[in-house]
Image: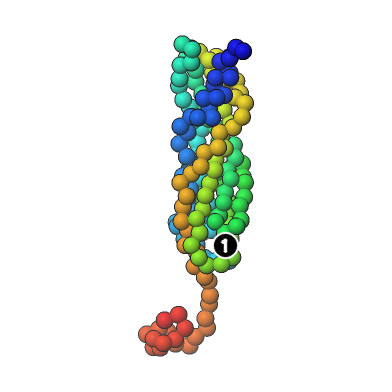
Amino acid sequence: MQISLPDIVREEFQNFDIPPSVIHSSPDGWGVSQRKTGFWADSSTREFDMTLLGVPVRVRATPVEYRWDFGDGQSETTNSAGARPREGEDPAFAHVYRKAGTYTVRLTTVYRGEFSVDGGGWMPIAGRAAIASEPVQMTIYRYHRYLVDEDCVQNPGGPDC
């Protein structure tokens, strides 16, 4: 059986050291139950140069899917990394935690690959590479509101003092 250059590239692509996406949240590292917590990932297209069978090959890995696990039994898959929300705006991609607690958020970024042999055109690589990110701990606080006629200075034993 003869192995061709595309077969070698496909096998190598599954083992590339593609840097993982970095998970971000807004607010940073915390949130409030029953309210939106924004998420996004720092990820970008990566290119690698290699030599296979004496031939220069350039490989491009492009993120195409983001598999989010929010740590509370909920998950979501998106085709976009999301973006940091502007001050005062709702996040483009968010999750609502139902209960207060500490949760571990996980993300797997899926990349599609292409390769170029000796400066030629780009050709697709069969298969995908799934890269897990470093998990992030989120502390989710409960939200509550009290109507009181005194503040904590006037009544240190009052609600939420």
Question: Residue reaching furthest left?
Answer: 153
Q: Amino acid at mark 1?
A: Tyr
Image quarter hosting the N terminus:
top right
Q: Which residue is mark 1?
A: 97
From the viewer's perspective, is residue 138 above or below residue 20? Answer: below
* Badge count: 1
Q: Is residue 86 visible?
A: no
Residue at the (50%, 30%) spot, across then down? 15
Percent x, y of residue 56 = 47, 14
Percent x, y of residue 113 = 57, 28
Asked where in the image residue 91 lies, by quadrant, the reply is: bottom right
From the viewer's perspective, is residue 64 above or below residue 135? Answer: above
From the viewer's perspective, is residue 39 above or below residue 8? Answer: below
> 8 or 24, which lies in front?
8
Secondary structure, mark 1, is: loop
Q: Viewed as shown, does residue 44 lie left or right of 126? A: left
Residue at the (60%, 40%) spot, across then down? 65
Q: Viewed as shown, does residue 157 lie left or right of 94? A: left
Q: Viewed as shown, does residue 129 lie left or right of 157? A: right
Residue at the (47%, 58%) spot, across then down? 138
Image quarter hosting the C terminus:
bottom left
